[in-house]
Amino acid sequence: MLEIRNLCAEIDGKAILRGIDLDVKAGEVHAIMGPNGSGKSTLASILAGRDGYTITAGSVRYQGQDLLALPPEERARAGVFLAFQYPVEIPGVSNIYLLKAAVNARRRHQGIPELDAMDFLALVKDRVRFMEMDESMLYRAVNEGFSGGEKKRNEILQMTLLEPTLALLDETDSGLDIDALKVVSKGVNSLRTPERAMILVTHYQRLLDYIKPDCVHVLAGGRIVKSGGAELALELERQGYAWLGGEAAGVAR
Amino acid sequence: MSLVEHFGAEHARLAAQLPGAGHPAVDSVRGAALARFRSQGLPQTRLEDWKYTSLAGLEHKPLPVAASAGSLTAGQLAAQAALPQAVHRLVFIDGHFAPEHSFHQLPAGALAASLAARLAAAPQDGLPADDPAASALSALNLAFSADGLELEVAAGVVVEQPILLLWVGSQPEHSTFPALRVRLGQGARACLVEQHLSLHAGTAVNTAVARISLAGQAELQHIKVQAEGPRVVHLSDCAVELAAGARLRSLVLALGGQLGREDLRIALQGRNAAAELDGLYLARGRRHLDHHTTVVHASPDCSSRQDYRGIIDDAARAVFNGRVVVARDAQHTDAQQTNANLLLSDAAEIDTKPQLEIFADDVRCSHGATVGQLDAAELFYLRSRGLDEAQARTLVTFAFAARCLAPVPAGTPLHDGLRRLLLAALPGGEQLENLTP
Ligand SMILES: Nc1ncnc2c1ncn2[C@@H]1O[C@H](COP(=O)(O)OP(=O)(O)OP(=O)(O)O)[C@@H](O)[C@H]1O
Ligand SMILES: [Mg+2]
């Protein structure tokens, strides 16, 4: 589904990604771990289409197309979803408005009829209940004044409505209490099907107790320095990054 | 014929038929006002306060004074009003009271009267004297002052529902001179929503004056919407005096017109008076919008907060000048001012300037002006959810603008109505229905 080859990117002349290779197949869940500042969010942002980065080498193919050639909205409509590490507040725009606009943009792209107000409301209320959120959140401005945990939950609410083919979750577990972590994991797991794939960026093994990954990668200094199965996360939890030596240790220090 | 001569001739033509004419208490005020306009003429760009706003274009277009009201239908009003379901609605067409379109259920102690009716009934009460601190435009307004609203709310009386005041321009090629006078007694409370709109796309010059006085502990929310037609020149001077403990919440939305100038002058005269001024100017096309605020802290322990926002697009131009004066004995003044601008095109222009004149020493005064583009993080967030770029830009622009509605309680018909007007004025805004936060 996703093939990243030798992806190199810089910001303001500073190299951030220095040759990423990653293959994600339909049905798989990959976890990316790694020290602060190693480039995890940069990778997720580039996949979602944020500008401000210069791609200096490499390629990304998603379902056979050149992902980097698409503007962010087309990637979203084609099924790429990024749950932001820091969800953005949009005052004056209600959550439900954004959800409806997003769902219908995706449906138009898929060539299925847009949902009318009634059907949409029924759907969104169902997902709000599933995410154990208060309905009043729908009528508040997007993320404005939401607590850290509420913002993360709201990201997953959007995801359960958009039903992406490729979900990128950037530290969705950070800042969540135990109960919220369970709800968020439930949301993520509900989308695990053989047709979909996910990349979870996380610092903590804890999330992976709830969402079991097929592969775990360590990103350090803009490169994937180690890949393994779920057991790699346990190893990292016990030992940190130092034992990996080289860049992982250097950056983690 | 120069503009001064033109209005001299107009005055000669109309003076005898203006309400209250023939009574010295009225004639003397109009006469003195005309004399001041004659001696000063239109404000010139060599005046510091008019540096960026030229009225030279008016010299070549002497428009006759609208001596009577044109006609319109109820549907035209309902479609454009900020508050379609108003309980209290007072309509003035071309500056003249339109009783057939007006209604109210004001409580005892609250009085809304047409100036023309009052002048006809009691000319001896005269007209308020000319305010020499106001520009010569205010004098011109007074010289032709024929009608307008006089709103009085007696001490302790609370008007619960907003009062909608519509100033409707129905005929092109005219000069209009609306006048508003508001007096709130001790502890009285009211919300006044003033909206200027045009039912034509032609040229017109609307020179408005408002004089508001709030007695001790009185509270007024004053919302002014300038939604004039694309070729209308809107020139406004509003002065508000606050006694001790009085509170003003002012919101000015400049959404239309070809050229708009808003002078808002606040005098905090008694202790603990508070003024909160919010504003939004939306300049598109070749529109020119100029906002000059003056807040005078004349007494100790008063506070003022100003938050003006501007959206300037295309080849439009905007001006913000925020003047704050703190008198020598106005200790413990708390005065804040911010002015945030979105500049959406290379040809758009903004001149923003704070002007602080502080003569007391124990004060907290702050000011800040920003000029920027649309927030990239917000745009990316929306696009990453599948919204196209144009839609995302409109939403982020709306989000920036909508912050000025914060002082109006969310979920009320007034909030909804103002948001609707805002959306209608934004490029692409009509696509964004159901935005309710
Ligand atoms: N706009 C920017 N300008 C300059 N440097 C940037 C910018 N954005 C990111 N960086 C740098 O790129 C590097 C990678 O940042 P990134 O956010 O991808 O790290 P991360 O792995 O997600 O870290 P964390 O675990 O703390 O979230 C960091 O050194 C960061 O300072
Ligand atoms: Mg990160």
Image (cartoon, rainbow, N blue to C red):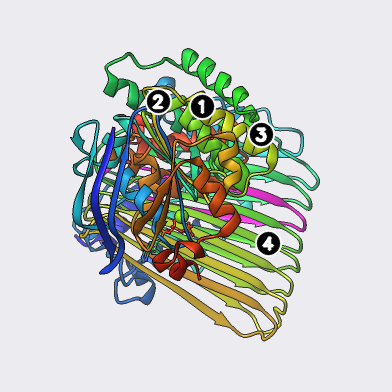
- Decide: marks 3, 4 in contact (CB < 8 A)? no
Chain letter for mark 2, please: A
Q: Quadrant of the N terminus of chain A?
A: top left
Q: Residue at x 50, y 47 (%)?
A: A232
Q: CA distance from mark 2 to mark 4?
A: 45 Å
Q: Amino acid at mark 3?
A: Gln
Q: Which residue is mark 4?
A: B274
Chain letter for mark 1, please: B
From this view, report whether residue B232 is shown above or below residue B73. below
Q: Is residue A94 left or right of residue A14?
A: right
Q: Which residue is mark 2?
A: A103
Q: Amino acid at mark 2?
A: Val
Q: Is residue B67 left or right of residue B181?
A: left
- Decide: marks 2, 3 in contact (CB < 8 A)? no
Highlighted range, magenta = B206-230
Q: Amino acid at mark 1?
A: Pro
Q: Amino acid at mark 4?
A: Ala
Residue B63 coordinates in the image, percent (x, y): 26, 48
Mark 2: C-beta under 8 Å from nearest atom of ligand 2: no
Q: Which residue is mark 3?
A: B161
Q: Residue at x 34, y 45 (%)?
A: B256
Q: CA distance from mark 3 to mark 4?
A: 22 Å
Q: CA distance from mark 2 to mark 1?
A: 32 Å
Q: Quadrant of ligand 1?
A: bottom left
* Residue B415 found in image quarter: top right
Q: Which residue is mark 1?
A: B84
- Decide: marks 2, 1 in contact (CB < 8 A)? no
Between circles 2 and 3, the one closer to the viewer is 2
Q: Are marks 3 and 4 on the same chain?
A: yes
* Residue B127 found in image quarter: bottom right
